[in-house]
Image: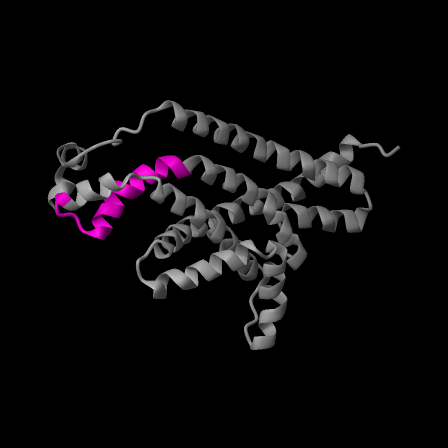
Amino acid sequence: MPTIRWTDVMAFLPELLRGARYTVTLTFVIMAISIVAGVLVALARMSRYRVLRMPMVAYVEFIRGTPGLMQLYYIFYVFPFFGLTLPAIAAGIIGLSINYTAYLSEVYRAGIASIPMAQTEAAESLGLSYWQSMRLVILPQAARIVLPPTVNYLLSLFKDTSLLSLITIQELMFTGILLGATTYKYFTIFTEVAILYFIICYPWALLATWVERRMKASPDPTSGIGPRRLRWVLGPAAST
């Protein structure tokens, strides 16, 4: 039965921690891009204009209907046949951002659609434009709804960065693969990798659970408001 030596654990740990730090950085960069792009895609999918809505529908359905690994491979290995050769890090960030944007856009679209139409009507009665209504009224309320699933997607993204090892990005998983290939101590190395993933992921899982419970327990301060109440909530913005 394989055994784990403490000296090996300490010898591999610095390199694995560097890989973990790279993984965390990639996770937050990709998530930031996906959140912003997800909101824009969600708004485009809800547009009354077919020229905006239909391409976004096709994009979301295609991405959700194909494996994320295939998308990474296509960007990294197939794009060069069309004259577009990307560095591994750029291909990885673009690939996972495209993938998570599609999924998050559906979360945000559902969150926006769940806001009662009376909220939009109340904002319009105050003279707010469509974008002012979205920015000041609808999106802040939808954010409360989509926050728990967004945190869960952040947790999933951290684990999915391991896919980037397949296009040679030296995150935590690829670092473990390289160490294993040179030392052949796979049992020790991948046990360490698994523990590091758990140490980083478990607090996020607890945070996701806490956020979900908090959102369910706290009432929406702007629920059921009319123009007068909305004017009080928006303050000076209501007159812009």
Whether 143 is among the magenta residues is: yes
**x, y percentage for residue 239?**
10, 44
Residue for point 45% across, 51% down: 34
Q: Quadrant of residue 126?
A: top left
Judged from this view, the residue extending furthest toward the right is 1
Judged from this view, the residue extending furthest toward the top is 217
Residue for point 42% across, 60% down: 56
Q: Main secondary structure of the magenta part?
A: helix
**x, y percentage for residue 124?**
17, 46
Measured along the vertical axis of the image, is residue 162 above or below residue 148? below
Q: Is residue 73 left or right of residue 6?
A: left
Residue for point 18% across, 37% down: 234
Whether 160 is among the magenta residues is: no
Colouring mode (rainbow / by chain / secondary structure / one colour)? one colour
- In this view of the protein, which residue sits in the foreground, 155 or 40? 40
- In this view of the protein, which residue sits in the foreground, 214 or 125? 125
Which range of residues does the magenta coloring cover? 125-146
**x, y percentage for residue 73?**
63, 62
Measured along the vertical axis of the image, is residue 57 above or below residue 16? below
Measured along the vertical axis of the image, is residue 96 above or below residue 84? above
**x, y percentage for residue 183?**
80, 47
Q: Quadrant of residue 167?
A: bottom right
Residue for point 41% across, 37% down: 147
Is residue 56 in sight in this rendering?
A: yes
Measured along the vertical axis of the image, is residue 31 above or below residue 4? below
Quadrant where the image shows the N terminus: top right
Q: Is residue 186 left or right of residue 28?
A: right
Q: Quadrant of residue 122?
A: top left
